[in-house]
Amino acid sequence: MEVNATDQHQDDDHTVPGAVQEDTKDTRSIQRGVRIDLGLEIGRVIISLSDWNEVSEGSILMLEGVKVGQAYLTDFEGVIAYGELLDVDGTIGFQIKRWRTA
């Protein structure tokens, strides 16, 4: 996806304030080498230690407030997007429905 947000005024050579400059070839090359560690979460469960002691193979842990297929995209700071899990040719995919707002 290429974004060209430079908008020149006809009567001068100033870029519109706040416009994102088009990436240079070098910048795009650097960005390709940078890796971002993202995670997908479907929910969390909080249980008491005594209940944890009862958990064994076959136990079912219930996630409250989460619908089937919902998931959250996370980075090192927490949730960055909300969406749903999809089957994409037999592989799990994540479709972003909404970005976290500040």
Image (cartoon, rainbow, N blue to C red):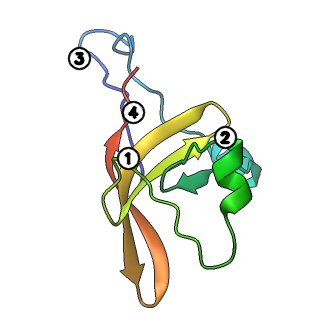
Q: Return the residue at label 1.
A: 82
How far apart marks 3 and 2 lie (CA) works out to 28 Å
Q: Secondary structure at mark 2?
A: helix
Q: Is residue 97 above or below residue 69?
A: above
Q: Return the residue at label 2.
A: 27
Crowding at mark 4 (Cα within 10 Å: few <14, some 14-19, many 20+): few
Image check: 66 left or right of 33?
left
Q: Secondary structure at mark 3?
A: loop
How far apart marks 4 and 1 lie (CA) works out to 7 Å
Residue 53, horizontal then vertical, whole percent: 73, 56
How far apart marks 2 and 1 lie (CA) works out to 29 Å
Question: Mark 1 or mark 4, which is nearer the start of the sequence?
Answer: 1
Is there a contact, CB below 8 Å, between mark 2 and mark 1?
A: no
Quarter in which the N terminus is drawn? bottom left
Crowding at mark 1 (Cα within 10 Å: few <14, some 14-19, many 20+): some
Q: Nearer the viewer, mark 3 or mark 2?
A: 2
Question: Mark 2 or mark 4, which is nearer the start of the sequence?
Answer: 2
Q: Return the residue at label 3.
A: 10
Residue at the outermost bottom position: 90
Is there a contact, CB below 8 Å, between mark 3 and mark 4?
A: no
Residue 30, horizontal then vertical, whole percent: 74, 46
Is there a contact, CB below 8 Å, between mark 1 and mark 3?
A: no
Image check: 95 left or right of 57?
left
Question: Mark 2 or mark 3, which is nearer the start of the sequence?
Answer: 3
Which kind of residue does numbered mark 3 sit on? Answer: Gln
Which label is found at residue 100?
A: 4
Is there a contact, CB below 8 Å, between mark 3 and mark 2?
A: no
Question: Mark 4 or mark 3, which is nearer the start of the sequence?
Answer: 3
